[in-house]
Amino acid sequence: MLAIIGGSGLTQLANLKVTRRLAVRTPYGEPSGPLTFGEIAGKAIVFLARHGYGHTVPPHQVNYRANIWALHAQGVKAVVGVAAVGGIRADMRPGVIAVPDQIIDYTHGRASTFYSVEDRGVQHVDFTWPYEPVLRKRCLAAAQKTSVAMIDGGVYAATQGPRLETAAEINRLERDGADLVGMTGMPEAILAREIGLAYAAIAVVANHAAGRGGSAEAISMQSIAAILEEGMARVRTIIEELVVTHGG
Ligand code: HPA
């Protein structure tokens, strides 16, 4: 079964016929909210709002382990994490949708592994390609089928938040090779890998990153909201197609 973790601007799926909501307890505490089980065009899907249904959980306080554990425990095999990001690379303009293929993790102090000593001992997990290639391709195919433009690839920089970055930090991220910047991509991706879930991300560029383009002086929260609303409508179209062709 496919799961969608929705980020800012995507707290529900419009065409989802909800069949049940389930509050799952995990060894790691509570997920961000109940899992919403439903169907799109007769295909089963699970939805979870990363920041809670009232958008009350900030990026650094999301219980990523509980979220991923809960989905896995319910029989989910593949997860698409949807997230709002800032655009660093010139073509990652506000409104652009991308499927990143790499991650650089700048977060700190988050519970970022299932393999702490008290849990499952010492393990080293391959993470050379952090996103599952087949699921990435399915996302790209769904976008193509629905004629929604989507950029294939990009390096996602995961920052700690909840504050946005300084202009100098964005320059540094660019020198590091980052194309997009967001606050929730990690540890979500590695936890999915550790537990054996296929994971891909759909990133919606909500704003130019700090110091770039329209964000040269400041990042406007109002324009972020407007861009996200429109961008997430296109993401819903992609997800519906993804579920129709690959859900179940
Ligand atoms: N930086 C980090 N996270 C974000 C941004 C940004 O500019 N925009 C949306 N999420």
Image (cartoon, rainbow, N blue to C red):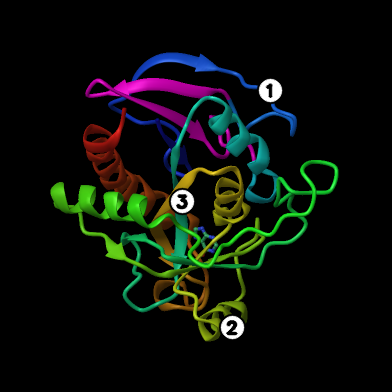
Find the distance from the CA under tag 3 to the CA under tag 1: 24 Å
Whichever of callouts 3 and 1 sits on the residue coming sooner in the sequence is 1
Left or right of 224 in this view: 107? right
Whichever of callouts 3 and 2 sits on the residue coming sooner in the sequence is 3
Question: Residue visible at 58% across and 57% down?
Answer: 183
Q: Amino acid at mark 2?
A: Arg
Q: Which mark is residue 83?
A: 3
Q: Which residue is mark 1?
A: 25
Q: Which residue is mark 2?
A: 172
Tell how many labels: 3
Question: Residue visible at 67% across and 60% down?
Answer: 160
* Above or below for 160 versus 32: below
Helix, strand or loop for disc 2? helix
Query: Is residue 2 rendered magenta in the image?
Result: no
Question: Residue visible at 42% across and 39% down?
Answer: 10
CB of mark 1 near ligand 1 (< 8 Å): no
Asked if marks 3 and 2 touch (Cβ < 8 Å), the reply is no
Q: Decide which of 26, 224 is in the foreground and name it.
A: 26
Query: Is residue 49 rendered magenta in the image?
Result: yes
Q: Decide which of 44, 55 is in the foreground and name it.
A: 44
Helix, strand or loop for disc 3? strand
Q: Amino acid at mark 3?
A: Ala
Helix, strand or loop for disc 1? loop
Q: Decide which of 63, 189 is in the foreground and name it.
A: 189
Left or right of 118 in this view: 94? left
Q: Which percent across, then down, holds residue 133? A: 37, 57
Q: Which percent across, then down, holds residue 3? A: 43, 35
Q: Residues within 10 Å of mark 2 (few under 14, many from 20)?
A: few
Quadrant where the C terminus is found in the figure: top left
Q: Quadrant of residue 39?
A: top left
Start-end of magenta stretch:
34-57
Question: Residue visible at 74% across and 34% down?
Answer: 28
